[in-house]
Image: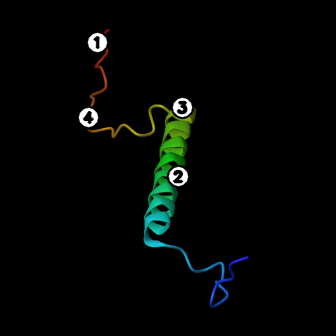
Amino acid sequence: MDQQAHPSSWLEVDVDLGFALFFLLLLCLFLFVTIVRCAQTVIDPYGAISTSTYQEEQINN
């Protein structure tokens, strides 16, 4: 059997795998933030709208 010259630790990752893991982590973070934002919108749909974007109707009797 071929043995490696030095024992590799689990922290040693080649460059391609490092980039792949970084972008996977970034994608998971983006997905988590999107899920949280969507859940907040579903729970309180009018909370995200500022009151300056719409005017209250004036009721004249």
Q: Earlier in the sequence, mark 4 or mark 2?
A: 2
Q: In the picture shown, does residue 39 fall above or below 54? A: below
Q: Dot 4: few (<14), some (14–19), or many (≥20) neighbours within 10 Å?
A: few
Q: Residue at x 53, y 42 (%)?
A: 35
Q: Which mark is residue 28?
A: 2
Residue denoted by label 3:
42
Q: In the picture shown, does residue 60 fall above or below 15? A: above
Mark 2 or mark 3: which is in front? 2
Identify the image quadrant of residue 19. Answer: bottom left
Q: Amino acid at mark 3?
A: Val
Measure the alpha-carbon separation of dots 3 and 4.
20 Å
Q: Dot 2: few (<14), some (14–19), or many (≥20) neighbours within 10 Å?
A: few
Mark 4 or mark 1: which is in front? 4
Measure the alpha-carbon separation of dots 4 and 1.
22 Å
Q: Residue furthest top?
A: 61
Residues under numbered marks 3 and 4 in contact, where contact means CB atoms less than 8 Å apart: no
Residue denoted by label 4:
53
Measure the alpha-carbon separation of dots 2 and 1.
52 Å
Residue denoted by label 1:
60
Mark 3 or mark 4: which is in front? 3
Q: Earlier in the sequence, mark 3 or mark 4?
A: 3
Mark 2 or mark 1: which is in front? 2
Measure the alpha-carbon separation of dots 3 and 1.
33 Å
**Would residue 60 appear left or right of 30 to someone viewing this image?**
left
**Quadrant of the image containing the C terminus:** top left
